[in-house]
Image (cartoon, rainbow, N blue to C red):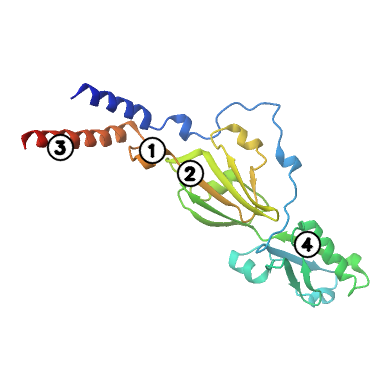
Amino acid sequence: MNRNLLYIFLLASLTSCLSAKKTTNFQGEITNESKLHRLVNVPYKLQVNDVLSIGIKAEDPKLVALFGASDVREGSSENLYFSGYTVDRHGNIRIPYIGELNVLGYTEREVREKIESELKNFIKNTESIFVTVKLSGIKFIVSGEVGSPGTVNLQQNEVTIVEALANAGSISTLGDRKNVQIIRKTIDGVQRNTIDMTSIDVFNSEHFYIQPNDVIYVAALPQKTWGTGTTGLQTFTTIASILSIIATTVLLARNL
């Protein structure tokens, strides 16, 4: 084998294989100086297409039966879609007798307080009324280099980036763990944030907890574009095949 070709082969083998640093999550040491962003996490503000679970209860069920609100926290996503209250494109939900109520940009607590205030127009003694407002799960999209890309809807109050990726089949071997992007649409516009899943500091990131309707994209490593393989054996086989084709072509050219 030509010495230059051998050098190229060795160089490609070293650069094409995936190192443990590229495929291992949560590397590094945990320090006591780390601050948990969860403790100062700003409450989520409702967006268009969010689905709310609203419950209105009282000692006398007849008092609240007219409002048609029921607690639908349990059940499938389909039940929540039909039974819950979807925020329309104008930022409103519709409750019987109360009518349209604007909730765009409000937190769950603020919506609950708005409903309690509206009920005072119909019920004198509202102290016996118990109102609950919750998001009917957290829906998000995961695409790119994961095992099962698609839309996921988890019936939880909060979801971490670790849970989100795990529910999408985890990052594939050719996924760039240093370049996991969270694309988020807010009232102020679209935000793009990048998380490094190889670092233990991901647990301290302000984006550790995702939000409803987030789009999570895992970029591919260069090895996927090169097609050289993820292990030493795969790289050796690929490059050996390429060199074999080159050698055959050279021999054929000489014999012409």
| In this rendering, the label closer to the viewer, 1 or 4 | 1
Helix, strand or loop under label 4:
strand
Instruction: Measure how far apart labels 1 and 4 are at the Cα level.
Output: 50 Å
Task: From the top left corner, tell me how far across and down residue 166 is, in percent.
Answer: 53, 46
Tag 1 and tag 2, C-beta contact below 8 Å: no
Identify the disc placed on residue 66.
none
- Residue at the spot of label 3: 249
Query: Crowding near pointer 1: few (<14 within 10 Å), some, many (20+)?
Result: some
Position of 169 with respect to 55 (left or right) is left
Q: Residue at x 57, y 43 (%)?
A: 162
Quarter holding the N terminus is top left
Amino acid type of the residue tagged 3 in the rendering: Thr
| In this rendering, the label closer to the viewer, 2 or 3 | 3
**For this rendering, which residue is in front, 62 or 56?**
56
> How many labels sit on residues?
4
| In this rendering, the label closer to the viewer, 1 or 3 | 3
Q: Residue at x 76, y 41 (%)?
A: 40
Position of 163 with respect to 231 (left or right) is right
Identify the disc placed on residue 132.
4
Amino acid type of the residue tagged 1 in the rendering: Gln
Helix, strand or loop under label 3:
helix
Say which quarter of the image contains residue 196.
top right
Helix, strand or loop under label 2:
strand
Task: From the top left corner, tell me how far across and down residue 7 is, in percent.
Answer: 28, 23
Q: Residue furthest left?
A: 255
Amino acid type of the residue tagged 2 in the rendering: Ala
Quarter holding the C terminus is top left
- Residue at the spot of label 2: 219
Of the two numbered discs 1 and 4 on the same chain, state the one appearing first in sequence: 4
Of the two numbered discs 3 and 4 on the same chain, state the one appearing first in sequence: 4
Say which quarter of the image contains residue 240.
top left
